Image (tube, helix red, strand yellow):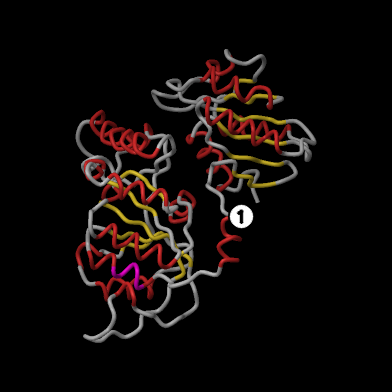
Amino acid sequence: MTRKKRRALLCMLAVPLLALAPRSEESLPASAAEPAAVPEKYVALTFDDGPWPETTEQLLDGLAERGAKATFFLIGEQIAGHEDTVRRMADEGHQVGSHTFTHMDLSRGDPAERLREIAATDETLRALLGDGVYWLRPPWGFLAPQTAAAVEVPMVYWSLDTEDWRRLDADAVAQDIIDHARDGDIILLHDPYTTSVEAALRASGLAVDDAILRAGIRDAMLPGRFQIISDAPRVILDVAHNPHAAAYLAGRLKTLAKTGRVLAVIGMLHDKDIAGTLANLAPEVDAWYCAPLEGPRGATAEQLVEHLRCGTVYSSVAQAWRAAMADAKVEDTVLVCGSFHTVAQVMEEIDAGRIGGE
């Protein structure tokens, strides 16, 4: 996966990085130190291997003081007994994801067991925090192609590895972030280590202007969630793949000023509720461009058409996408939906510069 695509998957969290002030033996604790300001960089701070009772709470306290947010990729078996910490993460606006249930190497062993590892943590998070899309960070970044094809949530890697687990040196890790982080980087840290927590808090800003925060919230978008990527024609990417998400998507479509037709490029997995999903979207769609998804879980285009009054069958998502864009007039809307896989394939088409996007 390229650096560009890794960034695209993660909802970037505004964390302004500041230079480190020199420390002495009598200096304040890391959480209270006053760093000297340098030009701001906005990065995503991500933490693996939690939650841990003391260090994770210390980290959450420090982030709250700074008005900063982070992403936590949790080990499922660590959650038991620390449910309040996980709830606090979500309540305070941090992003919560999965790091498998036992920190399993997803490139080895039984394929079914690898999927059970992912599912177990997903189920734990859903039971604790409610339905949602809990993104996955594979331990060590290892992931077998067969497993990758079967996972239907975004997978998040990193662009700056601090190696904090090896160094166990807050000064060195914090300075590494300051020296090497570029605007938009995804920074890998681990919250079980006190030194990592100190480094992250020392490198993050002490204040964020309220106007900047409001602007950031207003302009923020989650890739693939009602993501409008171009106008004339309007192109919307949405990974809705179940009836609940489809109903929400239909509601969002109703809020838009409709000046033309809605052309939907759709591909789904056969183990999803295809009938229920399409039924919720059908009233808002004027033409369907049905495509198969690859792999054993992929539904055929013909299976999708069975649940529609009318629809055109295409041999691939790319072909359906190109046909929809060719048919679309400037006043129309092209909607890409049905699965993360569908949206990802269209994004690859756009990245390749073939058609669409801005």
**Where in the figure is residue 148, as x and y percent of width and height?**
36, 37
Q: How many circles with numbers are drawn on the protein?
A: 1
Give, as a three-letter code, the residue at label 1. Arg
Q: Position of residue 54 (x, y in %)?
A: 23, 58
Q: Does dot 1 land on a helix, a strand or a loop? A: helix
Q: Residue 213's image quarter?
A: bottom right
Q: x, y percentage for residue 198? A: 29, 69
Q: Decide if residue 119 is on the left or right side of residue 337.
A: left
x 64%, y 29%: residue: 264
Q: Residue at x 74, y 34 (%)?
A: 328
User: Can residue 140 be found in the magenta stretch?
Assistant: no
Residue ID for mark 1? 218
Residue at 71% in and 36% down: 333
**In front: 3, or 198?**
198
Q: Quadrant of residue 235?
A: top right
Q: Residue furthest front?
A: 84
Q: Is residue 338 above or below residue 140?
A: above
Magenta portion: prevailing SS class: helix
**Which portion, as a residue range, is magenta?**
198-202
Residue at (63%, 30%) from the top-left corner?
Answer: 250
Rate crowding at label 1 as few (under 14), some (14 to 19) or many (20 or more) other CA atoms within 10 Å.
few
Q: Nearer the viewer, residue 72 or 172?
A: 72
Which is nearer the eye, 229 or 30?
30
Kindly indicate the quadrant of the structure image that contains residue 312.
top right
Establish if 88 lies above or below 310. Answer: below
Image coordinates for residue 101, horizontal then vertical, percent = 24, 40
